[in-house]
Image (cartoon, rainbow, N blue to C red):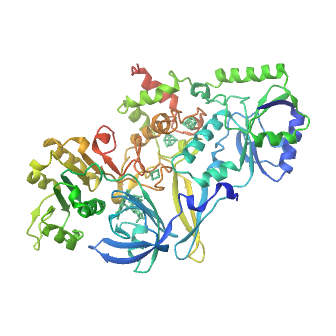
């Protein structure tokens, strides 16, 4: 090996060890983790970015950062869908995992200053949006009205219930939730997340709107927003794609000319509206 | 640049000396009726008159499977950098052009030290084409000859080679050619003639536009019947990706040792024509249809990758995909020309 061209610090595929300091199940499939990087280091990230989470011998997956840089440590929410995520679900407080990043584009936290904000979240889409929302709440005076719409498939799947209850009590933000299927313990809205949009219709046109949810959700939400003339350049989407490297090399995340791991996952909708395959 | 001439006998002695040196020497050799890059045991085995190799020299620069990291218990990772000195002997200009593109792609933005370390340990001896292959169209792509990237370039002028040493590594190699003499004007004329001829001859499929038009041509033809017409016959076998010198997409996988704790994280070639290349959780496939994947490959060559490397087209006209595709649909020129027929590119 030749030392001149090789430095470990610059190795783009090298995870840093981190330790799980808190863990709890948010529902039957989603695990919440609070991590601290070993050696007391802090990851310098902004809302919207993601990390590659690694378990030696199993592999890596891109996972959105759910905490805000205004707090200590790193919070992630991991849905149990396959080999790596299943193994992560078995980890306990004190166990280690590897983290590299942060990667990708950020939510427009600067551009949003002074504006009214609307967050539209479907299912696990609340996870990255929570980073932006918490950032805004920690700089509350810099932003206008804050509205959060949350749609969840069923009552049992609802995420961050205590935190949502706290948000609902705040007078400086508005939270509206809906679930797709009615449930005995639920007296709130029933229906998909788009059914909440008419309720805030008059606030939408001047607002900056941030959307995150499963691939099928975008089309319907964007159609509903178009009907009330929300400009495409004040709408932001957070897209999921297959990813392997996170650093613009492996080709997996590509949507046409865009590398989602670098130019995304957060996109201004006007940049994507004419890109086939994107939405 | 220093330019000299060596006779073919003297060149053979040079190759013998190279093989005896402490570097690994990989050169083009015949296997049955085709050619491959492989470790060179004798100078006699080297075939610089080859037409095209089955796989491109990419297999040494971005190997099919390459370790990135070693891991041990407790999430401890150590990078692996495997680069060892190697001479790649007999790289054709179109393949050199593809290596130049990869060099840019792996060094810009996020610097890939694994690729770059391996690359910096490789000395490339390129050679101008002697025998055009049945499907080469490098002349259409502007890659029938190449100006940079190699350490040394050989041009066959009949009974001798004109040798251009372009870098310090290349000049150091000329020490192993003590009998080389400065190239005469006549030698240089012959050398230029070979190159000019190749710029005409290496053109079995003629692209009906300048390569620089391709991004615009593609931009106008996302919805075009040709994608479905061709892709109907596609097996999603990925052979066109495997043989292509400019394909560099990869997968990352872990392999665990017997102790079940330590092991290696590898990267391995992947291909955008394979069905699950863009599939995520919930079995959602962002390019489910064969035609989406078929189109993606040609857009990557003609539009997306060029957008990253100052407009250079990421097809160098080697023709390997044409030969490899059993359905006979992978020919980029055929697709681009069909688009040309129905488009006014202004
Ligand atoms: C930018 C980004 C942010 C994400 N944020 C989160 C998050 O906060 N929480 C969360 O739980 N998940 C998130 N995901 C999805 C998560 O990366 C995948 O669920 C995970 O990679 C599955 O890995 P696995 O080994 O458990 O599954 P596997 O056993 O590999 O496969 C199970 C299923 O997941 C699919 N899959 C494999 N790799 C990926 C991949 N890289 N991306 C998406 N699907 C994949 C497979 O095709 C298969 O259908 C995010 C994905 C992206 C691109
Ligand atoms: S080689 Fe031909 S059949 Fe195979 S994936 Fe490529 S285009 Fe399809
Ligand atoms: S697309 Fe085909 S002709 Fe072009 S560089 Fe790749 S293998 Fe060669
Ligand atoms: S994830 Fe590898 S290029 Fe984006």
Relative image position of residue B221 (x, y in whole percent): 38, 30
One can see residue B326 in this view: yes
Residue located 51% across and 36% down the image? B330
| Apparent side of residue B181 relative to residue B96 in the rendered image (left or right) | right
Front residue of this view, candidates A235 and B300: A235
- Is the N terminus of chain A in the top left, top right, bottom left or bottom right quadrant? bottom right
Q: A115 left or right of B313?
A: left
B134 left or right of A91 in image: right
> Which of the 4 image quarters holds residue B89?
top right
Please tell me in which quadrant of the rendered image residue B12 appears: top right
> Is A202 situated above or below A127?
above
- For residue B130, side relative to residue B346 (left or right): right
In which quadrant of the rendered view does residue B259 lie?
A: bottom right
Q: Where's residue B230, x and y in %?
A: 44, 34
Counting labels gives: 0
Residue projecting furthest to the front? A141
The percent position of residue A30, horizontal first and vertical second, equals 30, 70
User: Is residue B243 visible to us here?
Assistant: no
């Amino acid at each position: 090996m030749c030392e001149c061209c090789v430095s470990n610090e610059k190795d783009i595929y090298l995870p840093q060890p981190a330790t799980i300091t808190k863990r709890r199940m948010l529902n039957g499939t989603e695990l919440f983790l609070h991590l601290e990087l070993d050696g007391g280091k802090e990851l310098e990230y902004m809302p919207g970015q993601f990390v590659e989470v690694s378990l030696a011998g199993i592999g890596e997956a891109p996972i959105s950062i759910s905490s805000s840089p205004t707090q200590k440590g790193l919070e992630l929410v991991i849905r149990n869908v396959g080999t790596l995520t299943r193994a992560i679900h078995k980890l306990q407080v004190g166990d280690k995992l590897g983290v590299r990043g942060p990667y990708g584009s950020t939510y427009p936290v600067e551009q949003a200053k002074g504006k009214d904000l609307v967050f539209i979240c479907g299912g696990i889409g609340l996870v990255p949006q929570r980073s932006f929302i918490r950032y805004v709440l920690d700089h509350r005076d810099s932003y206008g009205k804050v509205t959060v719409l949350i749609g969840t498939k069923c009552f049992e799947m609802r995420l961050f219930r205590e935190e949502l209850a706290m948000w609902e009590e705040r007078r400086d933000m508005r939270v509206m939730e809906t679930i797709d299927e009615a449930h005995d313990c639920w007296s709130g809205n029933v229906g998909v997340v788009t059914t909440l949009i008419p309720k805030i219709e008059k606030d939408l046109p001047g607002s900056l709107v941030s959307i995150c949810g499963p691939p099928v959700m975008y089309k319907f939400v964007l159609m509903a927003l178009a009907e009330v003339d929300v400009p495409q350049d004040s709408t932001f989407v957070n897209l999921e794609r297959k990813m392997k490297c996170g650093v613009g090399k492996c080709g997996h995340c590509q949507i046409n000319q865009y590398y989602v791991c670098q130019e995304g996952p957060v996109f201004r909708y006007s940049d994507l509206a004419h890109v086939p395959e994107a939405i | 640049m220093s330019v000299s001439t060596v006779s073919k006998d003297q060149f053979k002695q040079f190759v013998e000396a190279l093989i005896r040196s402490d570097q690994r020497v990989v050169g083009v050799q015949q296997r049955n009726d085709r050619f491959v890059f492989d470790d060179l045991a004798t100078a006699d085995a080297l075939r610089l008159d080859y037409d095209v190799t089955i796989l491109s020299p990419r297999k040494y620069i971005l190997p099919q499977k390459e370790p990135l990291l070693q891991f041990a218990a407790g999430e401890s990772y150590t990078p692996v950098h495997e680069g060892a000195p190697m001479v790649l002997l007999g790289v054709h200009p179109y393949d050199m052009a593809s290596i130049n593109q990869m060099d840019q792609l792996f060094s810009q933005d996020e610097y890939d030290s694994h690729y770059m370390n391996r690359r910096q340990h490789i000395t490339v001896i390129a050679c101008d084409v002697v025998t055009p292959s049945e499907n080469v169209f490098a002349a259409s792509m502007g890659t029938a000859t190449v100006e940079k990237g190699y350490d040394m370039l050989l041009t066959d002028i009949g009974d001798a080679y004109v040798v251009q040493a372009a870098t310090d590594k290349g000049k150091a190699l000329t020490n192993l050619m003590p009998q080389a003499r400065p190239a005469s004007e006549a030698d240089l004329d012959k050398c230029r003639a070979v190159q000019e001829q190749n710029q005409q001859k290496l053109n079995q499929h003629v692209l009906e536009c300048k390569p620089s038009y391709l991004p615009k041509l593609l931009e106008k033809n996302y919805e075009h019947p040709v994608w479905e017409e061709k892709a109907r016959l596609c097996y999603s076998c990925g052979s066109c990706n495997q043989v292509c010198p400019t394909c560099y997409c990869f997968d990352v996988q872990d392999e665990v040792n017997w102790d079940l704790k330590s092991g290696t994280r590898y990267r391995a070639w992947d291909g955008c024509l394979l069905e699950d290349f863009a599939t995520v959780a919930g079995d959602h496939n962002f390019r489910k249809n064969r035609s989406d994947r078929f189109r993606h490959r040609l857009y990557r060559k003609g539009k997306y990758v060029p957008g990253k490397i100052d407009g250079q087209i990421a097809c160098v006209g080697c023709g390997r995909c044409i030969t490899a595709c059993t359905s006979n649909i992978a020919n980029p020129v055929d697709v681009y020309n069909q688009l040309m027929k129905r488009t006014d590119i202004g």
